Amino acid sequence: MSDEPRFLRPNAIIEPLVDRFYAWHHTVAPVQAALNLSALQLPMLESYLQSPQVHAAACANPELRGGYFVNIPERRAGEVRDLVAAIKRDRAPMLRFAEAIGEAETLLQQEATGFDLTPLYPKLPPELNGAVELAYDTGNQATLRFIEPVAYRSPAYQEERQSVQLSLEPGVERPFILSTPRLPSPDALDLDIPFRHDGLRELFAARLSPTTVGRLREALEVPDDRVPALERLLTDAPGQAEDRHIDAGGRIRYFGHACLVLQSPEATVVTDPFINADTNASGRYLLSDLPDHIDLVVITHGHQDHIVLETLLQLRGRVGAIVVPRSSRGNLCDPSLGLYLRHLGLPVAEVDDFDEVPFPGGKVTATPFLGEHADLDIRGKSTYWVEIAGRKIFVGADSSGIDPALYRYMRADLGPADMAFLGMECDGAPLTWLYQALLTRPVTKKMSDSRKLSGSNAEQAGAIVTELGAGEAYIYAMGEEDWLGHVMATSYTPDSYQLKQVEAFLARCAATGVKAEHLLGQREWRW
């Protein structure tokens, strides 16, 4: 192996995996991961093994895009069969934990009738002992509260599930992350290491500082026969963009989806980083356009397109802190974002509404986030107010303007916004698309379809802009970018309701003198 200085290629990517499935919040956090493995992922793989042709046909049908169908060729069904057997063997404690949750829920439904809950503790399945508290809400409904730090210390959390697949950005859409496990590939480097492994920090530091093949091989514990795969990820020159820093004024760059990079000469704040690495593409900013140091990353909520591990893991060692909203501490549908990221080796600052996080020359204020979570009691969501280089920027993500009075309070406390950034996915997926595995009681299809993962429509977005007094308003691309189909799996036509609502919003802004734009690709603002 050569001792010549080497850099990580700018188009190198990482897919973090748990039991070969792409990792996101609900497949890593122990309680939710156990339920998703038991009620969703394992049955889906078994369904594939029964009828791989059905899954193949569904994956080829544009009408079923984003459905739970396994996109693996039938010739590799034997590998899927081996994966199923390994999950049943090695993840038995997780599967039993999920079963125990169902038993405890049945116990409460049958025996928690408004009286003292103390007699029920001895009846709990032993897998839950010490990890839950039984409680009534003020409507006298009994519930399980999970003591999440204990769950991370229990057999339900198995770090050995974690691995990474390293490769070069293929430039074509990858399989949908919620449905298709990543099998080994000769074009990828698969490593059985946890996400917090120090070798990953060493690898991604090589974007900025040279290393050697030998040093990386040792740091990542790469087997001798896979060293050529490691070498393919490296190059002899750095690939960082020359204009990634500024020396005066302020700048905002739109990197796609809900990702903004807000800069002054002293500091950088990045929102919901989900960043492409395809160096053969044009019209978009890439990982190589990020500044070397990022003071704060702010995360708005826990959905898989807003807290994206394949980007966050590449920023280890370059970020001062990742700011996340504090969860409700124990609610089944609201796992802690802070615990999740800390267990992956990332620096975290948790915030409640109107908490402030300073950075050189400015500050971030967490502000309330309404809606978008199918009416579930989820507190781990936040919008943000970023004050940088003399500007006030509202980062609205997928929040809804269902109650405009909230934004009136924000303006009274923080002053009018110079710029507002919003999502308008106003006809989102139904409740069960993302939360089916966590529902302890069935809901009808009619109920699920009425409770969508929807942000603001034109009227609601307009109300937000009006109440904030924003002079400029920008609507994120809502999964329209062709490079994030593996996560979003959305399909729009010019007649899609969402795009018609964006047009209506832009017309409203034009009529009221607000500068507005629907973003797609890259965009830059300087002052």
Image (cartoon, rainbow, N blue to C red):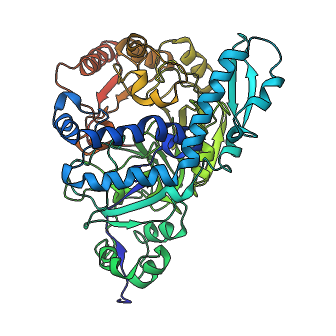
Instruction: Tell which of 46 and 183 is nearer to you.
Output: 46
Residue 467 appears at what percent x and percent y?
Answer: 50, 15
Q: Quadrant of residue 407?
A: top right
Judge left or right: residue 61 versus residue 227.
Answer: left
Residue 282 seen anywhere in this rendered image of the structure: no
Q: Residue 184 versus residue 7: which sits nearer the camera? A: 184
Count of residue discs: 0
Q: From the viewer's side, name the closer residue of 346 and 141.
A: 141
User: Can residue 83 be seen at all in this image of the molecule?
Assistant: yes
Taking the spot 75% from the left edge, 22% from the top edge, the residue there is 135
Query: Does residue 526 lie above or below 373 as drawn?
Result: below
Q: Give the percent coordinates (x, y) of residue 429.
A: 36, 24
- The residue sitting at 17% across, 31% down in the picture is 62
Q: Is residue 128 left or right of residue 253?
A: right
- Asked whether, in this view, residue 316 is left or right of residue 461, the answer is right
Q: In which quadrant of the rendered view does residue 70 lie?
A: top left
Could you tell me residue 210's position as x and y percent? 41, 78
Quadrant for the N terminus in the image? bottom left
Image quadrant holding the C terminus, namely top left
Which residue appears at 58% of the width and 58% of the height? 345
Locate residue 208 relative to residue 75 in the image: left or right. Answer: right
* Image location (x, y in percent) of residue 298: 53, 43
Q: Residue at x 63, y 33 (%)?
A: 327
The image shows residue 100, relative to residue 201, as above or below, that is above
For residue 172, above or below residue 143 = below
